[in-house]
Amino acid sequence: MLRIAITGASGFCGSHLAEAAAAAGAEVRCLGRRPGPVGTHVRWDAAAEDPDLRGADLVVHCAAAVGDHPPGSPAEAEQHAVNVDGTARLLAAAAGTPVVLVSSASVYDPRADRSLVREDHPTGGGHRNAYGRTKAAADRLALQAGAVVLRPRAVYGPGDPHLMPRLLERVRHGLLLLPGPDVPLSLTAVQNLAEACLAAAEWPPGAYNITDAEPYRRDTAVRTVLAAQGVRVRIGHVSVAVAEFAARRGLLPGLTPYAVDQLARPVVLDTTRATDQGFRPRWALTSALSATNDHECATPTKIT
């Protein structure tokens, strides 16, 4: 039986992974300040302590400090402590145990064209928030240590605490204004990410983009996500320049330069490296959003 240590298992991505790993027959150990949904709880404060990974056959590092804070803001120190220093401590403690890091497409430099982003896209600068900058630093540490690094984009699904609330808070009287014209965007169902985490234990070290099988048109995807919550909206468009001005001035709650960038410009990840390893994402918007229980979300593949 595979003994898998999952950090951040009380969070959105980590909890789905823990449930999928348990359903696949693994012994699950949930590392974090709070217990995960299944398995054994091993307490770990990623910002201050070395993790106890004794006996683990595989480590999947999902723990992260999230939040759309400007680079250089006071919040960046907290994100650095968890995302960078915590990752460094975990990699040192792993000491030869295979590690899969759940990174993010936020590591990619937004100044370069992202109409088709491969894993060699620059990650060294240009990040529009502290999260992207600290995740990029953690990503580099993991690659240097020989880990498998997964880079999902805009993870969504049952229990989503990020994408859905941000969209809902921008709906006014049934209208949602989006910056610029409709664009193609890659999204990642949390179920696809969980299955990729388990499959990646057998992949060569390196970075892999993880998304749903096909990109979506932004406006259609937004309508679908909101409709899953019973919210019907009309979508209007404002110019990117106006949206960026409002974001810089803080004129609308939750609207930041990062949010405008993520919505206004095409961002499509090339997943060839993952599919070359045999990974086939099974979940898409409708199926992922309609899955409401552990059985539906769990991978059927047994692991030993």
Image: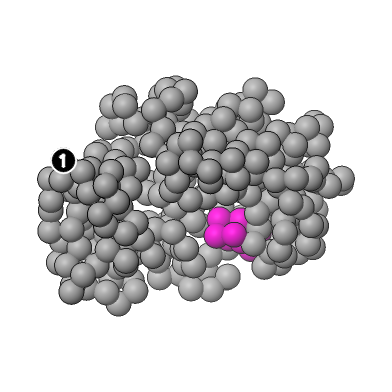
Outermost residue on the right side: it is 54
Residue 245 percent across, percent down from the top left: 21, 43
The one nearer the camera, 227 or 181, is: 181
Q: Looking at the rendering, which quadrant does residue 26 occupy?
A: bottom right
Q: Could you tell me what secondary structure mostly forms the magenta stretch?
A: helix
- In the rendered view, would you say 126 is above or below 157? above
Left/right of residue 268 with respect to residue 76 in the rendered view = left
Residue under the point 20% across and 54% down:
178
Give, as a single range, the part of the protein colored magenta: 11-19
Residue 117 percent across, percent down from the top left: 36, 30
Residue under the point 53% across and 43% down:
74
Residue under the point 30% across and 77% down:
230
Q: Looking at the rendering, which quadrant does residue 199 occupy?
A: top right
Left/right of residue 5 with respect to residue 273 in the rendered view = right
Residue 210 percent across, percent down from the top left: 46, 42
- In the rendered view, would you say 299 is above or below 179? below
Q: Which secondary structure, mark 1?
A: helix
The one nearer the camera, 138 or 280, is: 138
Residue 44 percent across, percent down from the top left: 76, 52
Q: Give the residue at mark 1.
A: 241
Residue under the point 41% across and 33% down:
127
Left/right of residue 25 with respect to residue 223 in the rendered view = right
Label 1 CA crowd tier, 10 Å (few <14, some 14–19, many 20+): few
Q: Looking at the rendering, which quadrant does residue 70 occupy?
A: top left
Amino acid under label 1? Ala
The one nearer the camera, 153 or 237, is: 237
Q: Is residue 260 magenta?
A: no
Observer able to see residue 214 = no
Observer able to see residue 140 = yes
